[in-house]
Image (cartoon, coloured by chain):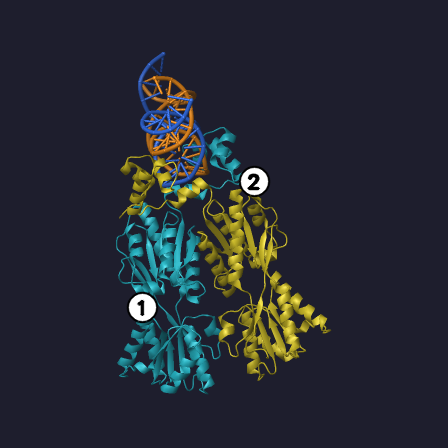
Chain colours: A yellow, B cyan, C orange, D blue
DNA sequence: TATTAACACGAAACCGTTTTCGTGATACGC
DNA sequence: GCGTATCACGAAAACGGTTTCGTGTTAATA
């Protein structure tokens, strides 16, 4: 078992001081070419790598960023994470990840766990429970301590910090317009139970589009579904009760479920009824018919979030801090597939 | 901006030494009840939390575990990761994750990045390229340094370390038997291009089942698909060339794709043809018909891997090291859905 | 030849903990 | 009243680096 080699070892072996070794490895001007060469050769030979922990302690920065997300087995978060990880790694940062599981308590615990020197900053998306309780003291605390924080997707207006969001309202508006342009008159909205701010914004866009086309918003056309297995029954009931010729869904699963029920009821897609869902995941690509979706560009979102965070971290170090927080908006796009006309 | 408080601050404020504060907070017997109370009260008031980095440096353990996986936007890895994260967090460990993107170089770089004191051990699944090149010097190096390492799913026989695998061969055998029991005679295998060891084992189980039923293995019935978009054409060609009444697929996507092509060709599922896929992801649950699958129990796999690793890490500390490495096998199960009879 | 600047390096402080060991004060036994 | 055990605490080293500042040696300058 080969032990990791330290500066001290090199110093002893080469009969110089630790400082000399340190400087030599950094190619400092202070050290003569001779010794530099000797030290560097020796270091390479024994594969010396500085101990990250020691460097972190000294420099007061870890080159780790903490990511706290509600769920990892979810396509959207997964892609965002991918973007974060990609950019962070390029910049020499590691990503420590914690999953809040949509729970407020876990979110708090995870943040405390990370916020004891382990990380230089946070990227997070609020858990469902946090949004419901509307309690963000743990976030405020972090910001107050001067720890950079970037919120994405599930953000809150009550906190001043950097944010990355999707143009939810506009893209929902556009999606609805697209359905209207197809000639649809009875457009339903399939959405989630507890109103997330994103769902709400999507609903706003949907309603605005209808209003601009002088169509009254019919609450009976808004289908609120739980995350259970009773969805199919509820959807059947929905189809029983109202007449529908298009459905805009705030996620992929609801759209797929609705399509299946529609097919079972003998409706032709997209002749009789059109579907658009949010999230460009596997389901929409492999469903039959394939589903037209709003692509949220998670990777891009993650990259932007990571860039914002790292910029903030590094500017704190260099001292040229910019006190104004920014909110960047990722432009979603609609991917046309078989579940809509044209 | 409130700065984080340290032992030194408390010591100065209370006019005692740093050692006293440290001991008092640890409820040491050495310290009088009086001072302990004072120190603890002060610490609580100012919300003192020890600096993880300093503790790590001193204790030579970080309570971080490094996870290197080929892909995060993949259901199976995602669930395994979930299991790792769950168990690790329960034990007070953080998870640092790096994605190798199926690339050998990235795998090596990521491991080097983490292996400079940042973590107490590794959990990983080999990248495709690493398996092809069959170069595992970076792993050997880690093991040699005494860093605990647990491999899962995509493992190698060339390395002595803890491992968690699936009973790939047996479950593929059972799945094939299941198809045979349905009366299927021409069972195809849909598999990946570059032979992973898992794909290979699944193929073995498939072949063994056929042989035991005195059915000759027909190489024309083995459909090797790329990860591109030309799959559909290839599958059509496959159906053109050979007669098939069942398909066992090493993943979910291939199975779904084959089902779609079969449907387009007017085949009834499961009357005319049956399907079984590996991976119990979203696709199989929401496809039409729903897909019978081999559930790999990723979460369980992750939990086991995390437990093995943490046990190893902690035993290294306590000194009662167990030099024999173990390989644990997770028992996959078949989930019956609509794509098979009965 | 004396002064000084440049050079090459080392000593030591520091980051925030943990932990060993030493020590002054008190209390106890004889 | 003296020796000793106990108590309660502090000094200091250690973890593995970075960085400031000081210093001895040599070479250049007047």
Position of B78 with respect to A260 (left or right) is left
Q: Position of residue B59 (x, y in %)?
A: 37, 42
Identify whether A129 is placed above or below B263. Answer: above
- Classify mark 2: residues with Cα within 10 Å, few (<14), some (14-19) or many (20+): few
Query: Does residue B308 show up?
Result: yes
Query: Does residue B153 show up?
Result: no
Residue A162 or residue B177, whichever sits in front: A162
Q: Residue at x 27, y 59 (%)?
A: B159
| Residue beneath disc 2 | B2
Q: In terms of secondary structure, where does tag 1 sit?
A: helix
Q: Position of residue B116 (x, y in %)?
A: 37, 48
Q: Position of residue A241 (x, y in %)?
A: 65, 78
Identify whether B292 is placed above or below D24. Answer: below
Image quarter (top left, top right, bottom left or bottom right) of the C terminus of chain B: bottom left
Image quarter for residue B77? Answer: bottom left
Structural distance between the alpha carbons of marks 2 and 1: 54 Å
Image quarter (top left, top right, bottom left or bottom right) of the N terminus of chain B: top right
Image quarter for residue A182? Answer: bottom right
Question: Which numbered circle lies on residue B264?
Answer: none
Q: Residue at x 35, y 65 (%)?
A: B128
Residue B16 or residue B146, whichever sits in front: B146
Q: Position of residue A224 (x, y in %)?
A: 61, 69
Please report, as a chain letter, where disc 1 is located: B
Position of A170 with respect to B31 (left or right) is right
Total count of labels: 2
Is disc 2 in the same subunit as disc 1? Answer: yes
Q: Residue at x 56, y 55 (%)?
A: A151
Question: Which numbered circle lies on residue B197?
Answer: 1
Q: In terms of secondary structure, where does tag 2 sit?
A: loop
Q: Residue at x 59, y 64 (%)?
A: A331
């Amino acid at each position: 078992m080969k032990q990791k080699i330290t500066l001290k070892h090199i110093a002893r072996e080469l009969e110089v001081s630790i400082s000399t070794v340190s400087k030599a490895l950094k190619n400092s001007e202070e050290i003569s070419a001779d010794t530099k060469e000797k030290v560097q050769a020796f270091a390479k030979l024994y594969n010396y790598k500085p101990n990250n922990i020691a460097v972190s302690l000294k420099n007061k920065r870890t080159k780790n960023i903490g990511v706290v997300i509600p769920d990892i087995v979810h396509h959207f978060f997964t892609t965002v994470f991918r973007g974060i990880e990609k950019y962070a790694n390029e910049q020499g940062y590691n990503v420590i990840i914690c999953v809040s599981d949509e729970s407020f308590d876990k979110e708090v615990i995870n943040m405390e766990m990370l916020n004891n020197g382990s990380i230089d900053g946070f990227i997070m998306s609020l858990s469902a429970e946090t949004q419901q309780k509307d309690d963000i003291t743990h976030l405020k605390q972090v910001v107050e301590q001067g720890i950079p924080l970037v919120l994405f997707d599930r953000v809150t207006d009550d906190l001043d910090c950097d944010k990355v969001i999707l143009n939810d309202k506009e893209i929902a508006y556009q999606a609805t317009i697209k359905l209207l342009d197809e000639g649809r008159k009875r457009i339903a909205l399939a959405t989630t139970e507890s109103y997330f701010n994103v769902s709400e914004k999507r609903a706003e866009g949907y309603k605005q589009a209808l209003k601009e086309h002088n169509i009254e918003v019919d609450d009976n056309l808004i289908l609120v579904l739980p995350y259970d297995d009773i969805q199919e029954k509820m959807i059947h009931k929905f189809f029983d009760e109202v007449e529908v010729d298009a459905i805009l869904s705030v996620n992929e699963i609801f759209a797929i479920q609705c399509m299946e029920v529609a097919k079972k009821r003998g409706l032709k897609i997209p002749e009789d009824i059109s579907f658009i869902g949010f999230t460009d995941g596997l389901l929409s690509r492999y469903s039959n018919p394939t589903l037209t979706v709003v692509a949220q560009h998670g990777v891009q979102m993650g990259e932007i979030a990571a860039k914002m965070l790292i910029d903030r971290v590094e500017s704190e170090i260099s001292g040229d801090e910019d006190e104004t927080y920014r909110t960047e908006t990722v432009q979603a796009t609609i991917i046309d597939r078989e579940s809509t006309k044209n």
